[in-house]
Image (cartoon, rainbow, N blue to C red):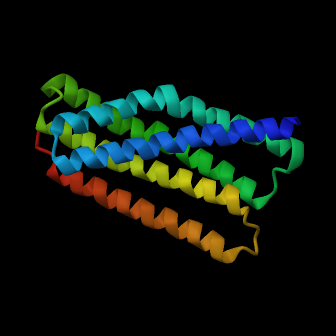
Amino acid sequence: MQFYQLFMFLHIACVIVWLGSGVTLLILGRAAVARKDKAAIVSVASRDVATLTRIFGPAALGALLCGLAMTWIAWDFQTLWILIGLAGFAVSAVYGAAVIRQASNRLSSAIRKYGPESTLASAEAQRLLVIGRFDTIVLAVIVADMVFKPDPESVPTLLLMAVALVIGGFMTWRGAQSVAASLPHR
């Protein structure tokens, strides 16, 4: 076995865990919201916070390190699809550290002050779940980038990936605004 194949296996395994965990949380959150089950909504979103630190972080770091190793072995850091993948990783990391962490902190605060069954905790949990969608979209675009490996002439693929990000970002923003409008005044 060559090191490249080992790093590729580990890279793909980490991405599966990273993206799969995000998709699973979205499905569980969507189901809880559809049932209008406040306790389940808060529970799923609270698990999201724990999952971010215990699963997402190490899986993301593993995907990055193995991707960097593969690039060092067989590619070059000036290849467009590699640059797009690195940019996507950076967007996901910054978005997680800034936006998702802030929403997580608001949820934790609402749970501490008003309890997990409160309307405010449920609304903050819904907002966190909506905000988390964008990160999953970013990860899906990174996977598409890795599979299709677009070059500068791959205009349709690049446009499709950009459109997915713009629409995903808009829908996330719109969903977060809708949830924020429903928040009870404190």
Depth order, front residue of 28/69: 28
Q: Where, by quadrant of the figure, is residue 140 drawn?
A: bottom right
From this viewpoint, which residue is outermost toward the top?
112
* Residue beneath the point at 20% across and 43% down: 123
* Residue beneath the point at 32% across and 43% down: 28
Depth order, front residue of 59/135: 59
Q: Inspect this view and state whether residue 99 appears.
A: no
Depth order, front residue of 36/135: 36
* Residue beneath the point at 24% across and 34% down: 42
> Image check: 93 left or right of 41?
right
Where is residue 82 drawn, in percent x and y? 74, 53
Where is residue 73 drawn, in percent x and y? 88, 42
The quarter of the picture where the C terminus appears is top left
> Image check: 44 left or right of 51?
left
Q: Is residue 116 above or below residue 137?
A: above
* Residue beneath the point at 55% across and 50% down: 139
Where is residue 115 drawn, in percent x and y? 15, 26
The quarter of the picture where the N terminus appears is top right
Where is residue 163 drawn, in percent x and y? 52, 70
Q: Inspect this view and state whether residue 89 appears.
A: yes
Q: How many marks?
A: 0
> Image check: 182 left or right of 53?
left
